[in-house]
Amino acid sequence: MRHKIILDTDPGIDDAMAIAYAIAHPEIELLALTTIFGNVRTHEATRNALALLDHWGSDADVAEGEPAPVAMPGNEPSYLVHGRNGFGEIDIPASRRSKHALDAVDYIIEATRKFPGEIVLCAVGPVTNLARLLERDPDVVTRIKAVVVMGGAVHRKGNVTPMAEANFWNDPHAADRVLGAQWPLVLAPLDCTMPVVFTPDYMQALARESPGLGEPLAAMAEFYARFYRSHMGIGGCVPHDVMALSWLTVPGAFRLQKGALAVITNGPAIGQTLFQPGGTQSRARCFDGRPDHMVMVDTDPEMFLADYMMVMTRHAVAGTGN
């Protein structure tokens, strides 16, 4: 069975790692990239999405998303982490294609009407587009097959503040709305992403075994890894965004916990993810009426790394990754 995917993204180095995986995986049908601010600004994300798809020979659509958070001023993009162009200063030729005529929200609405019950929406940046989607078409929750969100930190500390993960910190109001919606949602927080590191040796092997996809990713990863080394003492880089796709293709790599979720939207803890395990109760009113969702709370790094390498290598062997 092939998964029909719309990937909501802010490319971004780890976004590029996820896009490459989506293109390479035989069980993924990548319908579109919808773009959002975060690692770069939204118009830059659109430019980067088009460039990556052209560079890697994909004809998936690109629909541009929201330019700013739903209820607060935007933060500065993460140029320090991803480089001024989002690709670690590695040049990817600009696309001659244009973005889709529909904006991201209308594109998702039309796609879910065309394929009701078939589309998985994977969001790997701030979830502003998803919050606007719920506003514009509340019935979309009945047409979507699943939503997988890379964001938040449940049992771990944050990565932009001690409490907050970057995607949720960039639009906490949107994150709170999306996590409170009555749709089938799986959360991929830092709990499941931080155990996995793409080391320099791993990236060199990826470039060698799948040069078409792996060489630009390995070049980007050098910039990305410098940030992890200098700021976190990690010998490599973390492929956060791939987790939202890997949940669909290699679910056995993850340990799950079920519960209700909320996000703090003001004060010094803004962007913090709150979690109430399923079957428990508390006096915290923020969970009232909220559904239980699945949360990926840990990862088998060896299984994840083996799967990523295998998918990329098989793509190269098939003659489309060189």
Image: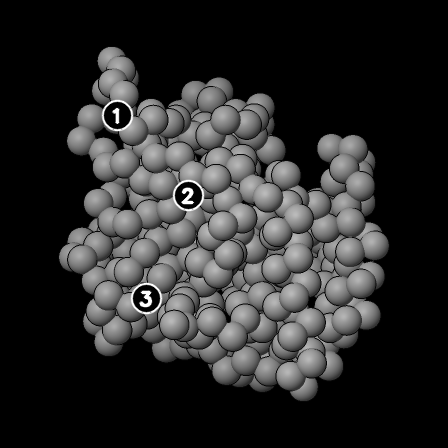
Residue 105 picture location, percent across and down: 32, 62
Q: Secondary structure at mark 1?
A: loop
Q: For the C terminus, give its image quadrant.
A: bottom right
Residue 216 picture location, percent across and down: 74, 68
Q: Residues within 10 Å of mark 1 (few under 14, many from 20)?
A: few
Residue 211 visible here: yes
Camera-nearest residue between 137 and 157:
157
Q: Secondary structure at mark 3?
A: strand
**First along the sequence among labels 2 and 3:** 3
Give the labeled residue for mark 2: 187
Residue 207 sits above or below residue 73 on the image: below
**First along the sequence among labels 1 and 2:** 2
Give the labeled residue for mark 1: 279
Q: CA distance from mark 2 to mark 3?
A: 17 Å
Amino acid type at mark 1? Gly
Left or right: 161 as drawn, with respect to 66: right
Give the labeled residue for mark 3: 119
Q: Quadrant of residue 6?
A: bottom left
The number of callouts visible is: 3
Amino acid type at mark 3? Ile
Residue 68 picture location, percent across and down: 43, 49
